[in-house]
Image (cartoon, rainbow, N blue to C red):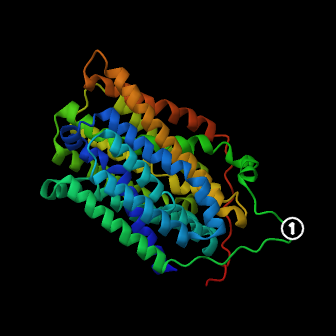
Amino acid sequence: MRIGLAGLFVGYMLSQFYRAFLAVLSPTLGTEIGAAPEDLARASGLWFLAFALMQIPVGEALDRIGPRRTAAVLLGLGGGAGALVFAGAQGPVAVQVAMVLIGIGCSPVLMASYYIFARVYSPAVFATLAGAVIGVGSLGNIAGSRPLALLVEAAGWRETLTGLAVVTLLVALVIWRLVQDPPPVERAEGASRGSLLDLLKVPGLWAILPLIATNYAPAAAIRGLWAGPYAEHAFGSGAAEIGTLTLVMGLAMVAGSFAYGPLDRLFGTRKWVVFWGNALSATCVAALAFLPAPGLWTVTALFAGLAFFGASFPMMMAQGRGFFPPHLVGRGVTFLNMFSIGGVGLMQVLSGRVFARASAGTTAEAAYPILFLFFLIPLIVSLALYLFSHDRPMQPAAAPEPRT
């Protein structure tokens, strides 16, 4: 099981890479195929929306056929084909089609890991394991920063994407070969398999959903898309400086994912760890929106703070996981992930429109405070609603289910 999880970890590294690499490629794609920031915002948003829409069928597949086939088939066919389409893109539309395919391919990888954690390991360590896979997987986020810029400079962006297509197919084959499915869940005679409607009847989830839909959106959108154009417009940064900026942000995401993992056991609460972490994240976004003419180093520090404190997704998944019975684990975790990734996708698509309107009749640099305010307001509203959520008691450690 551990060897198979290693394959899923690598698959999630690819997922993190693909959601973040457009920020580094934005100057090159603008020059070579005429992709404007609004075009790339749409492409990035479509990645997240495709990813989110796949969560319901992925959840069904995890519960019915298991994580091995679900992750391997989608990653190989969707991710590999999408990278090849991207490598041959001649305009913004082809990039958008490619990002939809890649989003479909990446959609099951993290949830396949979470499904195995929930079914095989003790509930008490779910948050730690969930944070670990994101922390390790975020190395892909780092690879999509300065290292990508160097690789593109040395080999060309089309050749780089072709190589990534090959790597994606190889990782899918490793997952097919090494991942082991947990044993099927035994249900009481006459009991139904459960459905999405059963999840919607869980009252404890409703106060969590707004925050899980907005907490990751500012960090994901800025790291994956707006960091590049912002640094270019505000500071005249080139690909190398943008790569360094996004590298710092990626490292902060890794550190945050590992830092959040054990905090529920340390403080005996998940709700308040999530609340105060996201309050600090909102503070960073507010500073970006309201500080007059911040310098590049100040912006880098605020981006890093946003990335670090915004890494609460594993803790929120652990909180939500406590509401799901065993036969709904697959659909439950993917349901939460649908809101998280869907929120990012929706806000990225809308952010392109907000930026276009805010920059009309003025400089692009002057539009960024409005863009940051666009990310801040939903986060603050969601934090207020999250105060009504239930802090599920820490579940006692339980003996893991038999492994196959």
362 sits left or right of 290 in the view = left
Judge whether 162 appears above or below 389 on screen: below
Q: How many marks?
A: 1
Element type at mark 1:
loop
Percent position of residue 152, x then y = 18, 54
Judge whether 201 appears above or below 374 on screen: below
Q: Residue at x 71, y 48 (%)?
A: 204
Residue 323 quadrant: bottom right
Percent position of residue 280, x then y = 45, 42
Which residue is at the far left? 154
Which residue is at the far right? 190
Judge whether 262 appears above or below 240 on screen: below
Q: Residue at x 45, y 58 (%)?
A: 105
Q: Badge 1 is on which residue?
A: 190
Q: Residue at x 58, y 59 (%)?
A: 58
Kind of residue sitting beneath label 1: Gly
From this viewpoint, is residue 220 visible? yes
324 sits left or right of 179 in the view = right
Percent position of residue 354, x then y = 40, 26
Residue 17 quadrant: bottom left
Q: Which quadrant of the figure contains the C terminus?
A: bottom right
Q: Residue at x 42, y 74 (%)?
A: 173
- Front-most of 25 and 301? 25
From this viewpoint, is residue 255 visible? no
| Crowdedness near tag 1: few (<14), some (14–19) or many (≥20) residues, C-alpha within 10 Å | few
Percent position of residue 27, x then y = 21, 40
Which residue is at the far top? 361
